[in-house]
Amino acid sequence: MQVEPQAFDRVLSSMCTDPHPAAREAAERFLATNPGDPGTYPNVAALEDDAIAMLGEIAGLSEPAGYVASGGTEANIQAVRIARNRAETDAPNVVMPESGHFSFQKAADVLGVDLRIVPTDDAHRADLEAARRFVDEDTVLVVGVAGTTEYGRVDPVPELGEIARSVDAMLHVDAAWGGFVLPFTDHEWNFSHAPVDTMAIDPHKMGQAAVPAGGLLVRDSELLDELAVDTPYLESTSQATLTGTRSGAGVASAVAAMEALWPEGYREQHVVSQNNAEWLADALEKRGYEVVDPKLPLVAADVPVSTFDSLRSRGWRISRTAAGEMRIVCMPHVNRRMLTSFVADLDRIECRASVPVTSDD
C-alpha cells in the first residue's frame, strides 16, 4: 500500500512547511545530483554558490561563504567544530542560553566540548550578566539565538558579540528559523549588526524550500579550512562539509524559493504570519489563557494538559515548550481558516469540560 505524506492542514507545531511550487519543481529536477562531489556535479555546485550568495544578502554578509547543509543541527555542529579546531585550549567550552537548540547538546557530546548553559531573563532572552560570568579563557564559542524555537525571541546579539570578543571567542548565531523573517523587523541579529563569525539559517523553514536545505554561513572563508579533509577518490581535493553525499534537490529548491520570494514575497509572508500569530494570541487571551506575547510568528500559551491532549486527539499537531505551554508556529501553510477551526475546537473542548456532571441518585 502506498503511504501518502503528512497533510499540512492541521500541522501547527512544525518549523518546516509546504515548499513553494518553484522549489518543489527544482527539487525534483535535481534529485540525483550531489553537491558533495562538485567536480562530478558542477551545475549543482554552481547553484550552491548562488544559494550562499543569496543567504549572505539576507543575513547582511557582504562576502558570503559557507554551504547548504542538511539543516540547523548540522550547521550548529559545524560552528562548534570550527570554534574548537581554531582554539588553543585543551578544555574548550561553549556558552549558550538555555533557549538554545538541543543540537548544541549533540555537538558537545560528539566534539568533546563543555557546554555551559546561561539562564534566560524574564523576556526569555539570554541573561547578559550571567553570560559574562560563564565565559573564561577556555571559551571557544558564544551562541546567540535569533528566533528561539520555544518563544520566538531574539537574543541581544551585539552584546553577546562583545562578550565573545572579551575572551577571544567566536560568535555563532542560530537563525535557522528566524533568518527569513528577521530582515523585516527592527531586531539586531545578523553579520551587519554584530561581529558574527558563523550562522545557521535554514531555507527549508520560513524560506519555503524543500527539505533538506539548511545553511551554514561564515564571515571569512578561511574558517571553512578548519573543517576541510582530503578527498583522494573524488574529483575535488578536499571537503569541508559534515556529510559527504548531500542533497542537490535541497540546493536547487533553496535557490528557486529565494529567487521567487526574496525580498517582497518573504516580506508579505512575514506580515501574514505575524498577523496570524497576533490574532491567535488575542483569541487565546480573550478565553482566559496566559499567553507569551508573540514577537515573531510563534505563540506559546498556558493551556491545561487535558485540553492539550484533547486537541491532539482531534488531529491537531501541537507541541509543548519545556515549561509546558502549548506551542504553535504560524508557518506559511498556517492560515486564518486553520486557526479559526483550531479555536472552534478549543471552545468545544472547554465547553464540554465545563458542563457539570449530574447523578441519577
Image (cartoon, rainbow, N blue to C red):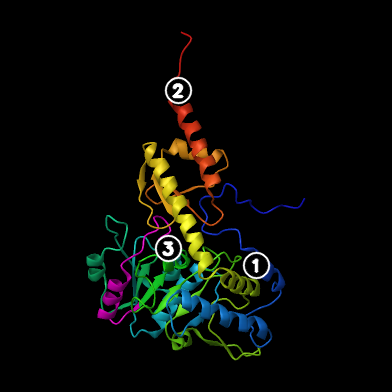
**Residue picked out by circle 2:** 355
Q: Is residue 6 visible?
A: yes
Residue situated furthest right in the rendering: 1
Q: Amino acid at mark 2?
A: Val
Q: Amino acid at mark 1?
A: Ala
**Residue picked out by circle 1:** 22
Residue at 25%, 79% (x, y): give it. 166
Classify 10 Å Cα crowding around label 3: few (below 14), some (14-19), many (20 and above): some
Circles 3 and 2, Cβ within 8 Å, touching? The answer is no
Residue at 50%, 47% (x, y): give it. 318
Of residues 169 and 57, which is closer to you in this image? 57
Would you place residue 357 above or below residue 171 in this image?
above
Circles 1 and 2, Cβ within 8 Å, touching? The answer is no
The residues colored magenta run 148-170
The quarter of the picture where residue 142 lies is: bottom left
| SS category of the residue bearing label 2 | loop
Q: Amino acid at mark 3?
A: His
The quarter of the picture where residue 23 lies is: bottom right
Q: Is residue 326 visible?
A: no
| Nearer the camera: disc 1 or disc 2 | 1
**Residue picked out by circle 3:** 101
Residue at 52%, 55% (x, y): give it. 14
Of residues 355 and 278, which is closer to you in this image? 278
Residue at 47%, 40% (x, y): give it. 308
Q: Disc 1 to disc 2, how far (Cα)?
A: 50 Å
Classify 10 Å Cα crowding around label 2: few (below 14), some (14-19), many (20 and above): few
Q: Mark 3 or mark 1, which has the lower sequence index?
A: 1
Q: Mark 3 or mark 2, which has the lower sequence index?
A: 3
Where is residue 13? Give x, y as percent. 50, 52
Where is residue 55? Give x, y as percent. 50, 76
